Amino acid sequence: MIRIGVMGCGVVADYGHIPAILQTPGLKLEAIFDPDPKRLQMESSKFGVEKAFTNQEAFLDSGLDAVLVSSPAPFHKDNVLAAADRKLQILCEKPLAMEDHQAEEMIRYCEKAGVMLCVGFVYRFSRVAQQLKSWVQEEVVGDIRSVRLVYDWDLHGEWEQDEKGKWIKAPRYTGRMDEGGPMVDCGVHQIDLARWWLGQEVVDYHAQAAWVGEYEAPDHVYLHLNHAGGAHTMVEMSFSYGHTARDVTPMFTYDLIGSGGYLRYNRDGYILDAHAGDRTIRVPGTSEKDFPAMHAAFAEVLRKGEPGDFPQGRDGLIATKIARDATNEVIASRKKLLQKA
């Protein structure tokens, strides 16, 4: 039995990682860590985890084989390096780090320590992404030339009511915007998918954006990627699509256009099909993410002692660098325009 610990017991760990670990054969949730005693106690009671620590060192010394780092992004570097010092295998949430040089340091540190640094690109493991990967490899619609990936949503709203019923800025919304906005937070998944599906590196990229809110980062971003094999990817990401509305209708779609047809996924209705000439292939669609499948794959990585096709630190660095560079590009461009106005 592989003993795994969870560093950071926030929203994603609560609804995604911890339940998935508990249902994965071969994995044992040995311990959890969070500096917030209230949150730690809540997760410990909810999931029946006896070893619960507010002290990072005590957690890392509690008899683990591997750790999941699901803390806020600014803490990833410290968590990863501390785990590597204990020779623990690591699965880290995205974005890997706040700065590219930090991610580079994390990758080198883990390589020197002889431990794997895997990245939680959970979208890769959904049946939808896996099916699209198979169709691309089988050239069901020929050579893929154009990819269009859209995720426009409200990040659960910019405002929420506190315990006294007062409307306040939602910490989740402000936190994700302060960390870089939608392209850095969510867009890294789509960038990773495009590289993985096509098997082509990104050779250049540029972005355009809009500011609906008053944050430094844009809340609606359009990113264009040119791949080494000649394909083009467009990623559209938004946190302001209904962010102040009561009723929201998020959009989540994948379109892969090839020389002999197109592949399509729409989360609204879980539509997943391939259109190739006079032939249409329809298969059941599912959610765009699959935590149980990702942790099952991670368990296999740990058993074999080699990463295989599991996304690694370098994949996390590439996707985050593109997302952050593109975001910084449009921020700088907007500042110049405002200075001229």
Image: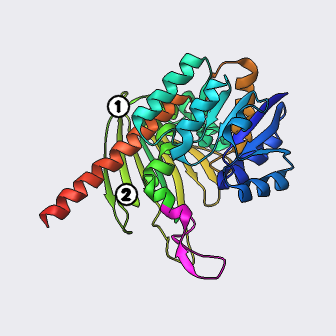
Mark 1 or 2, nearer chain start: 2
Residue 146 appears left or right of 115: left
Identify the element where label 1 is drawn: loop
Q: Position of residue 207 (x, y in %)?
A: 31, 49
156 left or right, relative to 236: right
Residue 298 circle label: none
- Amino acid at the residue labelled 2: Ala
Q: Residue at x 60, y 56 (%)?
A: 267
Q: Nearer the viewer, residue 14 or 258?
A: 14
Please give the label number shown on residue 230. Answer: 1
Task: Give the Cα separation between the discs numbered 1 and 2.
Answer: 30 Å
Q: Which residue is mark 2?
A: 217
Residue 202 rendering spot, x and y as whole percentages? 38, 32
10 Å crowding of disc 2: few (<14), some (14-19), many (20+): many
Q: Which residues are magenta?
A: 156-174
Q: Which element carries disc 2, helix, strand or loop?
A: loop
Q: Is residue 250 visible?
A: no
